[in-house]
Image (tube, helix red, strand yellow):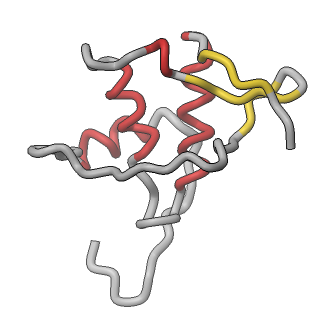
Amino acid sequence: MTGIIRLERKEEHRQVENLVREAFWNVYRPGCLEHYVLNQLRNDEAFVKELDFVMEKDGELIDGYIDAVTGEYSTPQGYFVDEAEAEEFDKQFPYKEKLRLPGQIF
């Protein structure tokens, strides 16, 4: 698959958040928080918009990845996502059923 990698435009923020939501929904946990984290990162003073890229093919944003990128992620000290705040943010998107696993408490 080939596409164009370019900087994200402000009017695409919502569409990109939805792409992220679709990509991570029910993958690591019921529902997902990744689209909310992306939304919050954009409002942080440390966010570098010059490094905010998207992939486009035939004029449409697509999900994708950059092959051969390696690295290590560690959770920043004091990092916390408020579940209630994320749930409220999620109401802005179309409803999706959360995965329920056997024996799941939450």
Residue farthest along the left direction in this orientation: 78
Q: Residue at x 36, y 37 (%)?
A: 37
Residue farthest along the bottom direction in this orientation: 103
Residue farthest along the right direction in this orientation: 58
Q: Residue at x 45, y 58 (%)?
A: 31
Instruction: Pick the quarter of the image with the C terminus.
Output: bottom left
Count of marks overlaid on the render = 0
Q: Nearer the viewer, residue 37 or 97?
A: 37
- Above-or-below relation of 24 to 4: below
Q: Nearer the viewer, residue 105 or 6?
A: 6
**Horizontal placement of 5 versus 27: left or right?**
right
- Above-or-below relation of 98 to 102: above
- Above-or-below relation of 73 to 104: above
Q: Residue 32, located in which quarter of the rendered image? A: bottom left
- Above-or-below relation of 11 to 74: above
Q: Position of residue 66 (x, y in %)?
A: 64, 42
Q: Residue at x 77, y 27 (%)?
A: 56
Instruction: Pick the quarter of the image with the N terminus.
Output: top right
**Horizontal placement of 54 versus 41: left or right?**
right
Q: Residue 7, located in which quarter of the rendered image? A: top right
Q: Position of residue 21 (x, y in %)?
A: 54, 45
Q: Nearer the viewer, residue 11 or 49?
A: 49
Q: Position of residue 67 (x, y in %)?
A: 66, 48
Q: Residue at x 55, y 42 (%)?
A: 20
Q: Position of residue 13 (x, y in %)?
A: 54, 21
